[in-house]
Amino acid sequence: MKNLLTMNDLSKEEIIEILDAAERFKGGETWKEGSNKYVANLFFEASTRTKCSFEMAERKLGLEVIPFEAQTSSVQKGESLYDTVKTLESIGVEAVVIRHSLERYFDELARLNISVINGGDGCGNHPTQCLLDLLTIRQEFGGFEGLKVSIIGDIAHSRVARSNAEALTKLGAEVMFSGPKEWFPSQDRHQHRPIDECISDSNVVMLLRIQYERHDSTSSLTKEEYHESFGLTESRKARMKPTGIILHPAPVNRGVEIADSLVECDQSRIFKQMENGVFVRMAVLKRALETN
């Protein structure tokens, strides 16, 4: 059994092994041992990219995917997450992908003998999003040592920000944060800098979606005011390094975190991230199932 719960669980060498495996899948490698292995996707929060990307990865590996919809499951009768996953383990499912609003939901599953792949836990972690971001960055720059990466936006509520900051720092990149200071965790050890400094000084500009669903109160800024103060406007994009790239985990709020015209511009790699996500998830699933 091999889980993937947080990026902190992976050594630098393990991260590189997963990225290498993803590259091989992207190059056409197949995994014949995937047939007759059973997985299930348990999404308790809305998702388009992560859920569909995992399903595509599972089909490409030849896995048997057991359908599960939270809205029509026994969760609606009050069944706990532990009992739901224990049930799937009992009927022969070997790995589960879980997205849940509860931070570190996976702690209660530690006693089970089934691989758990974290598809996102509250404001906590999103390791496969981080790995696909890393793969996209490595394809552009060949490595991570000495790169400057700015993560801009709703830092406090973003599981992507936390996972990426941990991994990029481990791999030798310099990580800077920017965005509204009220959305910046006071205990965070990473540097908070003005957005215009970040934009002009970074190899990678990573924008974050505003996590409205996790806010206790609405922001005092309108969408237009946020875009002008903390978004990637066309004038800010003009000050990026010529070799700099734009990332966003999506879904994108066009005209808020990033100008509509820049989502598919020449320096954007947003849809390349989505493409890479399938191959990263193939690598993660293979890693989990090979050791069962």
Image (cartoon, rainbow, N blue to C red):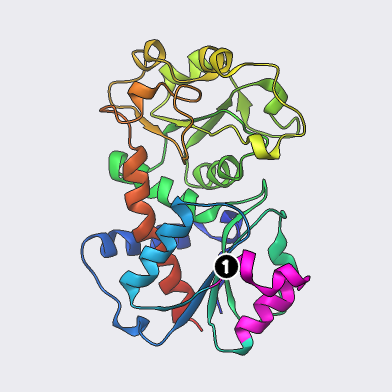
Which percent across, then down, holds residue 27?
A: 21, 61
Foreground of the two, 1 or 190: 1
Q: Residue at x 52, y 52 (%)?
A: 47
In this view of the protein, which residue sits in the foreground, 15 or 199? 199
Residue 7: percent from left, percent from top: 56, 55
Residue 74 lies within the magenta run: yes
* Above or below: residue 235 compared with residue 187: above
Q: Quadrant of residue 64?
A: bottom left
SS for callout 1: loop
Q: Is residue 75 left or right of residue 68?
A: right
Q: In the image, is 235 to the left or to the right of 230? A: left
User: In this orientation, does residue 80 appear?
Assistant: no
140 lies left or right of 18: left
* Mark 1 lies on residue: 69
* Main SS, magenta residues: helix
In the displayed structure image, the side of residue 135 where residue 12 appears, left or right: right
Magenta part of the protein: which range?
A: 68-89
Residue 184 vs 196, above or below: the answer is below
Q: Residues within 10 Å of mark 1 (few under 14, many from 20)?
A: few
Measuring 71% from the left and 70% from the top, which residue is drawn there? 75
Residue 289: image x %, image y %?
Answer: 46, 79
